[in-house]
Image (cartoon, helix red, strand yellow):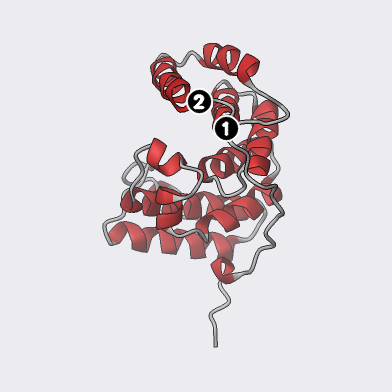
Amino acid sequence: MKNKTPENKRTKKRRKPSKNKSPIDPPRLDELKKQFNILSDDQDWNAIINIIEPLLNRDNPDHWLLVQLAAAYHEKGDYDQAVIHSAEAMWVEYDCPLARWVFAYALLLRGQIREAIDILEEYVQQTPGKIAHGECGEGSSCNIDSSRAESIINDARLVMGFAYRELGYKSLFRYYKDVYKRQIDNGCDTVFPEGFLEEDEN
């Protein structure tokens, strides 16, 4: 009998439109990526926003620009705009892992925990290969290999566990925490500091 853990729960896949060719030519995209990397290092999120907004073609939007716009708003603490633009990016390219991550985390920080969990549940069901080498190209763009993708998925499990705990589901928190810890014991990397869970075991 199939183990009915939360990660085996079937989630309804939303319809996405047919893919459009990016309105931004590849050399210009490469130039923007380098520019955004510099501005991100300087934490100049307003500069990134000011560059992107005039470039957006609402009739044929580029999902990468929308994700970068959402991430910039997220970093500056405007979670309402982060939700709006990451949702737009997901409509253009539903399977984009970065769009999903920004969307889910912005929902969490807006207090929309149940909605965030719905997105995270789909996120952790993805294979590392799909995140690293998916059609949207975000994995390759961010130099994410399958090992790094597995780490991202595992971190998402822990975030989802804490989200469930906020809703009072302590057994689900323990489940995802235990899965996360097993992966760490097996050599999986994490963004969370060593000893993080030991400080918050209850």
Examine the rendering and report whether any part of residue 11 can be seen: yes
| Residue 171 on image: x %, y % | 57, 66
Residue at position x 42%, y 16% in the image: 35
| Residue 10 on image: x %, y % | 64, 68
* Dot label at residue 25: 2
Q: Badges 1 and 2: C-beta atoms under 8 Å apart?
A: yes
Q: Compared with residue 116, is residue 186 higher up or lower down, i.e. above or below?
A: below
Residue at position x 45%, y 55% in the image: 130
Gap in angstroms between the C-alphas marked 1 and 2? 7 Å
Q: Quadrant of the N terminus?
A: bottom right
* Dot label at residue 22: 1
| Residue 186 on image: x %, y % | 28, 62
Q: Residue 70's quadrant in the figure?
A: top right
Query: SS class of the residue under badge 1?
Result: loop
Query: SS class of the residue under badge 2?
Result: loop
Disc 2 marks which amino acid?
Answer: Asp
Tell which of 125 and 165 is nearer to you.
125
Residue at position x 35%, y 63% in the image: 182
Disc 1 marks which amino acid?
Answer: Ser
Q: Compared with residue 193, is residue 147 higher up or lower down, i.e. above or below?
A: below
Tell which of 125 and 189 is nearer to you.
125
* Dot label at residue 199: none
